[in-house]
Amino acid sequence: ETRTTFNRGPQRSFECMWRDMGNAVASIAWAVLLLPPITAVFVIISRFSLLHPIQAVSECLSFLTSASAIFSFILLCGVIIMVGFLNLEYYTVIPTIACSKIALLGQLLHPRQFVNSLGHCIMGIIVAWCCAITVGGRYETIADPCAQGDGSPQMCLNEYHLILLLAGAFVGFSHSLLGVIYNMNYVSFHTVQQYKYLRFKGSLSLVLKCSATQALYSVRNYIVVYFFLGKWSLSVHPLDSIAGLLDLSLLYHLWISASFLLFTWHLTLLLFRVFVTEVYSFPVQSSFTEDAHQCLPTVLTDKQPMILKFLALLDLALLSQHSPSRRSEVFSLSQPGGHPHNWNAISKECLSLLADLTQRLIAYHDTVATNGRAKSLSTGSERKTSSESSGMFPRPTLLMKTPASVFARSIVGCPQSPLTAPFTPDLDSPFASPALRRLTAPMDQCSPWFGTVQSPHIMRRVPKLWSTSTGEKSQALFADSQAHIWALEGLSYLVQSSFSEDQFGVVQTALPSILSCMLGLQEAVDRHFKLPHASSKPVRSASSMGDSTHKTLRFALRATLKTSIYRITTTFGNHLNAVKMSAEHRKRLQQFLEYKE
Amino acid sequence: MCSLALFPPPLPSGQTTLCESNNELLSGTTTEDRLKLESSPLSLFFPRESLKLHCRTESSSKAAFLDHSETLWMRSAAAWRDGGFTGLLDEITNSNTEVPKWLSVSSGCTLALLRWFSSFHGSLFPHLTMSSEDMLAEFSQVLNWSDCVVRAFAWHPHTDKFAVALLDDSIKIYNPKSATTPTLKHRLQRSVAAVQWKPLCATALAVACQNCLLVWHVDPCSLSTRPSSGCAQVLSHPGHSPITSIAWSPSGSLLVSASPMDTAMMVWDVASESGVPLQRVGGGGVTFLSWSPDGSHVLASTPSALFRVWETRMWTCERWPCVKGRCQSGCWSPDGSRLLFTVQGETVIYALTFTDTPAGVPTCTSKGSQAAAVVADLSETTFNTPDGDIIVGGEIQSLAWDPTGERLAVLLKGDPQAADRPAIIAVFKTRTNPIFELLPCGFVQGEPGTEPRLMQFHPNFQHGALLTVCWSSGRITHMPFYFLSAGVPHFGLSGSPSLPRPQERPADFAKQSLFTELMS
């Protein structure tokens, strides 16, 4: 009996890319389709006047059919397409968590981020120009005719136009920066599955609120910046005075334009997220060998692209819960040969994911234990030890496998760019932040980053900028835990249904390893949550487009892990006493059997 | 088809129902009963006098203080905090001596406009004008909730422990295997409408409160009798209060909550404290939720004559308009294929059948029956007893179906004013496999002068079914129904082909059948 080894060459990656692209293109197409109504609403809001409603409406209608309107609309479409492709290029399913302020600064100053910011600036200017055309009136042109002192007509700078364009650039730039700070490129998966339209509709009001609020803050900041820096000698109406800037109509138009800009971009982002996280049903097995590389067991075991692995795990979690016929395919034996290849591949991959997390947690805990405990005893003699501790600080020994992120992917080309250079000279120093090190580490070492855990002394002495917060370290450890959550769910549901559905007993053979893996992880997670700050809840930021799901992944993982073990123990009950396992695991399992965990 | 006429008559005064054995309900006198009650560790008694009640609510103490020495700004901020936008407008309108005339006049006009609009809205959905306490009492599954000593009760789904929410807003957890009885108190734990333990978990208890949802984590091994409020997670969403009903998914992963003030039903991922509102227009709110034991459907009733049945894979819903009133209560058969529900203003029990879609195909709705069938008519029936005529029947407060699917308990409202129309629990024998059947079993009665308020079946009683009843006196009793179960229910194995099992059918079982599917 032979198993075909599949060619995982260019064909695979091409297909994956195609699927990714297909979804992204569909989301961009929808964003472009939604642009006309949004623009029409914007035109009406920006031009409407209470005193002459009918005149305003007729003006709007005549503007909408004018050539300049159509030209600016085409520009807007171009911007939306560009934003969509930037979303596709920068998105990640595993968030990049900056463990310290300096690491965040490193992210912000990264050349890749610089390109992103520049792109958003330029697109901001383009959208603002379209807004200027739309609003019309005094904003329409960059130059105004003005009379010089000698009476000769001359063109002067129209500052109203300029202020709008610069506002666009500012809002675009700040949008790009906030994107990094709030992890806007992170795409999270929802626990509640919904159809695309319903998910979109459900989030629409939130997007509108976010855009309006963010626009308000951006405009406020912009006005302050403009007040100090906006000195244009050529202007007719200088606006850099308090009176000039406190023009209500100007502020209103700035806010409306910024809201319009942010709303269209956020909408594109929302559509992208909805499309890219859509559940995809992979076949469990195929009768044709050439399709085998698209089957669930094969896709699961692949490392790249991450999104496909995540979708496969999500599909596994759903099929194990809802679909008896697909479960029976998982439990089936190969023809000929009679080997449970599907189950073996799936369970092996899930177990290796969980074992990987267990190792990561144990290694982290060991580092904390060796570094932290010795120091914490000497809290009283802080002054004396602090002076020499910096040099003697133990070298970080922990090798942590980081979830490969899209952000890190980009660094291959430019490991030592001039922009990051000021922050990278001393990678071996204990102060160097892990994230920074990751940014500069070459990718071919499978991107290890060295977790340093600062002792409380060091944290107090060095500026806050450098310090690593334990809560964020904990977040970083669990950054890719969505995969573990699905692996746990998938395994536990499959084991549960195997009780009545597994005709050949294929699951039984793996039961000891599944149980010991889960119990081992349970022990590691329990120990991790006993660390300071690990169980402290993060602050929620409700009104931002950024996704804060990653901040609570460790809690979700802990809950899912317990539920999964209980799912197995309630199904099998005392039959589990016949399963071979170590005494320590047996003790833990007994706690579960007695409902004492 | 009057179902109650076939029931054995209610017990004479002084007798209480003890248990079911050999197919008949056994009763005893009160003194015997009391001895039995006191010997059983799980039978509890909370005399009303023993509870320390809140003398007044937070808002009522406001009038006792004169706070007009504060500046207008402070008062406005306080009004904004306490009463929101309308509170702020009210404050500005009332302090017309301090603010410019145009401001007080315009805020007065806005306020009038808002009130007119809300009264218009309120005429569409009358429940929106109620206070939140009244709303909880109106939509609760508990009979006469505001007067109840025991306001909510929940058995743990896997072990023999239960939680009891009392009138003084505390929750006590009783476990026969443990000497400690933890008492849960929290600043936000007010007007508890429902409690439920998380399935596949030993610690988590969800509590529906007036302003939020609390999820307590009570370590069963801990010796502490007063877990700190740090053990509770607070889940809240703007506009989503008061919460009248909650339901955990049988897989323990999600929690849904309902508020009559919110048209959206919240689906919570409790571990990450994030909620997804599932918004549907129409109905004006959500009052009662019930998750089917196989996890595939959720019943969500609204204050209007409309209820929804959600399927939980893609969260789409079916609308079921009722003719007369709102859906008051509902319960699922153990395999999740059949839903029994009652409608306010009607005295019948309806049934809906859901058949699973072909497995693996993610379709949006489950194809079921097109109309609900009447399975039982509980209209008023007069029984002649030695103590005089007793009228039993009428509107139904709540339904409970035991986990084996063989006993159905129906709590009848009765009439608190009339002595001969008591609130009473009628128990039916049911059978879901191979066809749905309903047979009379008997009435469950307590001590004289007490009425049943709340009932729940034990989730895994070994010898049949165990019905726990909370009485108006503050007593909690457990009533066993001993029988041999025809089959073990299969939880969580949705859609798996069930093997035909031999039916152990007593000879006289089918004699007095009230309803079988063959009839309809």
Image (cartoon, grey):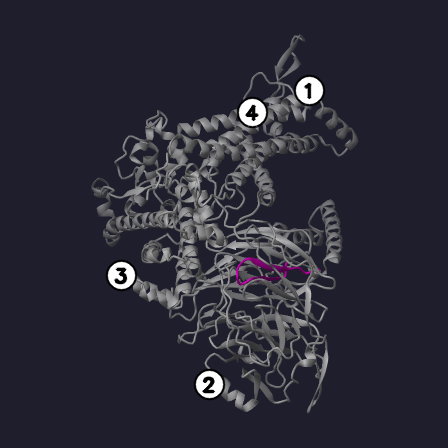
- Compared to residue A535, the image places residue A429 above or below, namely above
Q: Residue A102 shows which numbered tag?
A: none
Measured in 3D between alpha carbons, the distance from the residue under mark 4 to the one under mark 1, in whole angstroms, is: 20 Å
Between circles 3 and 1, the one closer to the viewer is: 3
Determine crowd level at label 2: few under 14, some 14-19, many 20+ residues with C-alpha closer than 10 A: few
Query: Does label 2 lie on the same chain as label 4?
Result: no
**Would residue B283 appear left or right of B223 to someone viewing this image?**
right
The residue tagged 4 is A125
Q: Quadrant of the C terminus of chain B?
A: bottom right
Measured in 3D between alpha carbons, the distance from the residue under mark 2 to the one under mark 3, in whole angstroms, is: 42 Å
- Residue A94 visible in rendering: no
Which residue is at the front of the view, A382 or B273?
B273
The residue tagged 1 is A67
- Location of residue A29 by image quarter: top right
User: Badge 2 sits on which subunit?
Assistant: B
User: Badge 3 sits on which subunit?
Assistant: A
Q: Position of residue B23 (x, y in %)?
A: 56, 82
Measured in 3D between alpha carbons, the distance from the residue under mark 3 to the one under mark 4, in whole angstroms, is: 65 Å
Please name the amino acid that badge 2 sits on: Ser
State if disc 1 and disc 3 touch (CB < 8 Å).
no
User: Badge 1 sits on which subunit?
Assistant: A
Please name the amino acid that badge 4 sits on: Ile
Decide which of tag 4 and tag 1 comes sooner along the chain: 1
Q: Which residues are magenta?
A: B286-304
Look at the image and say whether residue B298 sits in the magenta stretch.
yes
Determine crowd level at label 4: few under 14, some 14-19, many 20+ residues with C-alpha closer than 10 A: many
Q: Mark 4 falls on what kind of element?
A: helix
Q: Residue at x 71, y 21 (%)?
A: A66
Between circles 2 and 3, the one closer to the viewer is: 3
Decide which of tag 3 and tag 4 comes sooner along the chain: 4
The residue tagged 2 is B39
